[in-house]
Image (cartoon, rainbow, N blue to C red):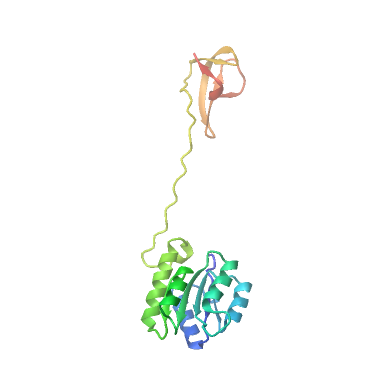
Amino acid sequence: MSAVRFLVADSSPALQTFARNLITGYGFEPAWVAVASTPEAALASAREQAPHFLLTDCFSKEQTTGLLLAAEVKKGTPDLRWALMSARLDEELDTLARNAGAMFQLAKPFAAADIKAAMGKALEQWGQDNHEVGRRMPGYRRPRAVPVVPVVPDVPAYKAGDYVEYQGVRDTVRHVIFRRGELVVQLSNVSGMVPATKLRKL
């Protein structure tokens, strides 16, 4: 089982606990969910164990805002998924977050049902590309592997008794075998097997 690491960055211990319980409620291991109270602590945690998903406060009064935090964490995890929570969510911030790739933005204070719905939708969307996430979502079906069909070379059909030419000499086919994806022929006057592609049918 591959670890799917989450990082919750928010100054509220209550929200940290709620978010951790929400995430582990989907079946993710508690050890996979790290929490941080400041952007600096979040960056230190991200450097130690690169998260796959960042749920962060806006930290609008901090030098490192939630948007900058996401951008910094993304340097170490280019395919980072993230979401923003903010008590100062306005149209401009909403647009900036969306353009920066946020999976959702929530205005604080929000109801438990709001973050549950947003997080569930984000995980379902993410799960389409990540089996470890997707298999925890209701109704998920793992994509079936497409079978690899061996390519059979386009060579003439041979059978015992056929006359062929091999290296300029006429000979007769004794046996025909399809071996390791290749059609080979045993001739009357040649020891060993000869690739059918080296014969010319007479």
* Residue at 54% in and 68% down: 3
Residue 17: % across, % down: 49, 84
Apparent side of residue 111 relative to residue 174 in the rendered image (left or right): left
Position above or below: 180 against 140: above
Q: Residue 63's image quarter?
A: bottom right
* Residue at 42% in and 58% down: 142
Residue 32: % across, % down: 54, 74
Residue 85: % across, % down: 46, 80
Apparent side of residue 110 relative to residue 179 in the rendered image (left or right): left
Query: As drawn, which residue projects farthest toward the top?
Result: 170
Apparent side of residue 154 relative to residue 41 in the rendered image (left or right): left
Residue 42 appearing in the image: yes
* Residue at 55% in and 13% down: 171
Q: How many marks?
A: 0
Residue 134 appearing in the image: no
* Residue at 61% in and 18% down: 190
Q: Residue 35's image quarter?
A: bottom right
Residue 155: % across, % down: 48, 25
In front here: 87 or 55?
87
In front here: 9 or 200?
9
Position above or below: 146 against 22: above
Q: Residue 111's image quarter?
A: bottom left
Query: As drawn, which residue projects farthest toward the front?
Result: 92
In front here: 178 or 17?
17
